[in-house]
Image: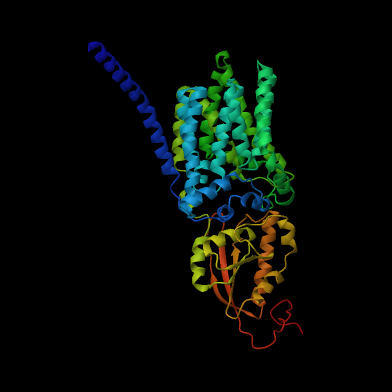
Amino acid sequence: MSVAADRVGRMRGELARLTAGAFAPLAGLLAVLAISAEVRTRALGSPYWIDEGLSVGIASHGWTQIPGLLRQDGSPPLYYLLLHGWMVLGGRSEAATHTLSLLFALATVPLGLWLGRTLFGARAGWACAVLCGLNPLLSAYAQETRMYSLVALLSLLLAGAFVLTFVYQRHRFRWLVAGALAALMYTHGWGVFMAAAAALALAVLVAAGPDRRALAIDGAIALSVAALAFIPWLPTLLFQVAHTGAPWASTPHVHALTRGLHRVTGGAGPLTALLLAGAVAGFELRSAARGREARAACVLLVLAIATPLLAWAYSQHTAAWATRYLTMVVGPGMLVAALAIARAGVAGIACLVIVAVAWFHLPAYRSLSHKSNARALAARLAPLLRPGDLIVAGQPESGPLLRYELGPRLRYATPMGAVDDAGVMDWRDALARLRAAAPGNVLALAARLPPGGHVALIRPVTSHSGWRARWTSLVKRRVAALATALGRDPDLRRVAAVPPGRRGTEATFRGVVYARRARTGPRRPPARRCPGSAPCS
């Protein structure tokens, strides 16, 4: 009995020790997750803006339809397929779809803890968890129905698996590299630039590494598997490059890179603190004992720097740049920052505190909760409209958002004419089609309305400075011409105007509603007017 009792006592003691040892890390992880959730749920139910309307509109279609529809949009399918399944389970409300992005963002915290701890030790693991839990760019897109928090999660997984495979030579993780890279390319177009950066980092390691043959074999396997997995989507990607692209984007200048760096790091203060930690850690990593960590830091820096540089260079010829796409570098960026903080000693801890305090208050609540006034505008328009009325989205890509807010019982059009599927923006050769658009496209649709039917023109507010790209400047001209034509149509009378009210930071609209007059005789063409107000003779 005494021997058995001793064994039971030792087992209980061991279990208690293990439980006590696991409690502190678990409590710490839960605390970081709780703080991250508090930061990332401040505007969880905020109204959609244009891009979110596009996401919900595409994901509202069936799984088998989504890949084909994306030939019109220009994006890969993975996020939309996941969003479709999520909406089937949780609904289409703003809070419901934002929650999916929130979960992806929160998942970076335990993943960052595990990767940082595995690669660089416990201190780096906790630093990475804090950085991933509070990064302001990721916090912004944790509350938006877009793919960017998933992009950050996959980039973190890819960066960590890449270092494990090619720096630490844990060969089994090459399959994780292949899977994460393929998933990243199926989530966002910049995944191709990340793949090129990964190939560049691998080439650097093979050139300088001690076991070139093993590295080359592992790299060939990982990158080839990812490329093979992406081949089914390649024809669609090539079609999108030729026919959709991003006509709304401007050619980025050099300062777009510095602005992007500030967005990822939260501004000059946090950036300075992180650079200071990196400078202090650089001396520590120069020692021979830290050679492997120095190689890991170089690899992560190549992934974080080469990806946006390649995208920037490509965008000098074909528009493909937006600051929000820089979530692609959050993964390698947070890992290398965590390594710098861990190796900078007391200075690193001080820098982490500075960064965490600054990031806790970012992004500003107003920038998240007032991205668009479409919801408020729709609430004021709804009592004026009846089923079958015509909604004209002056900014064509706002059509899916207006369809979400105003519902399916209305008809929808753009300056280019009627829209068959109002939940999807057809970007195929859209710039050329908008150049060819004339007000007559919409006037012909208005002429088919019964007497008393309504036309609502929803115009973007273009008074700010963001309307200089080829697409947006053309939208501005076309919607102005359309508004003039509707106002002069003798068969229409203006019955209401809905001002923009609170102006959003991303998309602000105002509306004008016209009613179709009852015809009392044959329609006469409108009087031709000379400059000024008098009719021409």
Comparing 112 with 11, the one in front is 11
Query: Height in image: 29 above or below 41?
Result: above
In the rendered image, the quadrant that contains the C terminus is bottom right
x and y percent of residue 388 in the render?
57, 72
- At horizontal 47% and vertical 30% (from top left) the residue drawn is 113
Comparing 48 with 180, the one in front is 180
Is the image coloured rainbow, by chain, by secondary structure, or in one colour? rainbow
- At horizontal 69% and vertical 18% (from top left) the residue drawn is 213
In the image as oriented, which residue stretches furthest toward the bottom?
A: 521
Number of numbered tags placed on the structure image: 0
Residue 437 sits in which quadrant? bottom right
x and y percent of residue 493 in the render?
60, 79
x and y percent of residue 216 in the render?
68, 22
x and y percent of residue 154 in the render?
56, 36
Residue 508 shows up from this direction: no
Comparing 222 with 193, the one in front is 222
In the image as oriented, which residue stretches furthest toward the left?
A: 1
Comparing 248 with 71, the one in front is 71
Query: Height in image: 326 above or below 290?
Result: below
Query: Height in image: 221 above or below 370?
Result: above
Query: Height in image: 279 above or below 33?
Result: above
In the image as oriented, which residue stretches furthest toward the right?
A: 537
Residue 434 shows up from this direction: yes
In the image as oriented, which residue stretches furthest toward the front?
A: 1
